[in-house]
Amino acid sequence: MNTQFNALIESDLSDIEYIHLSSNLNLNQEQIKYLFLKNIDNVNINLLRNKNCPEDKINDFLTLNDKIYNIAIAHNPSINQEVIQKLIDFDDKDVTMSLKFNNLV
C-alpha cells in the first residue's frame, strides 16, 4: 500500500470517510482488498464498480445474488465475459440496463 493510503487508514476514518476513499478509481488491488474488510455496503458498492477490483471479490459478491451488488458489478468496465453472462443470467432488467449503460451488451 502507498504512504498516503496508509496515513489515511491509520487516522481512524468514519464510515463516510471510508465511502469517500473507496470511490477513488486509482486504488490498487491490495488497497481494494483492505477496504472490503471494512464490510460497509456503500464501500463495497464503490469497490465493485472499480476497474481494479480483483476478480475473486467480484465472484464472491456474485454468489450473494444481491441486486444492488450486481448492478455495481455491471458498472465495472473491466468485468470479463463470464461475469457478464452470469449477470445476464440473473434476468434482472435493472442489472441488464446497467450492463447496457456500460456498453457491455
Image: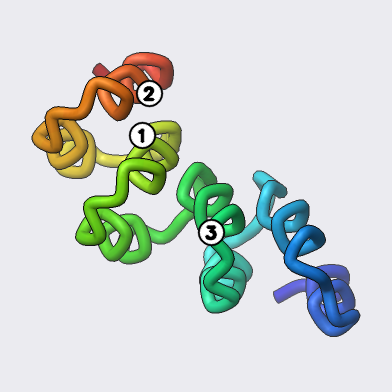
At 26% from the left and 40% from the top, the residue drawn is 80
- Determine which of the numbered discs, if any, sits on residue 41 in the image: 3
Pick whichever of labels 1 and 2 is earlier in the sequence. 1
The residue where tag 2 is placed is: 98
Q: Report if the CB atoms under discs 3 and 2 are less than 8 Å apart.
A: no
Where residue 30 appears, as percent x and y from the top left, is 56, 72
Q: Of tags 1 and 3, which is closer to the observer? A: 3
Residue 38, placed above or below residue 18: below
Task: Please report whichever mark, 1 or 3, sits nearer to the chain's N-terminal start.
Answer: 3
Crowd class of label 1 (few under 14; some 14 to 19; many from 20; radius 10 Å): many
Residue tagged by mark 1? 74
Comes first in the chain, label 3 or label 2? 3
Q: Quadrant of residue 32?
A: bottom right
Decide: marks 1, 2 in contact (CB < 8 A)? yes
Q: Is residue 79 left or right of residue 24?
A: left
Image side of residue 105 versus residue 51, left or right: left
Question: What element does badge 3 sit on?
Answer: helix
Q: Percent x, y for residue 2?
A: 77, 72
Mark whose residue sits in front, 3 or 2: 3
Side (left or right) of 54 relative to 24:
left
Residue at 65% across, 57% down: 27
Question: Label 3 amino acid?
Answer: Asp
Distance, label 3 to label 2, CA atoms, is: 19 Å
Q: Nearer the viewer, residue 65 or 26?
A: 65
State how far apart marks 1 and 2 are (Cα): 6 Å
- Whole-angstrom CA distance, mark 1 to mark 3, is 16 Å
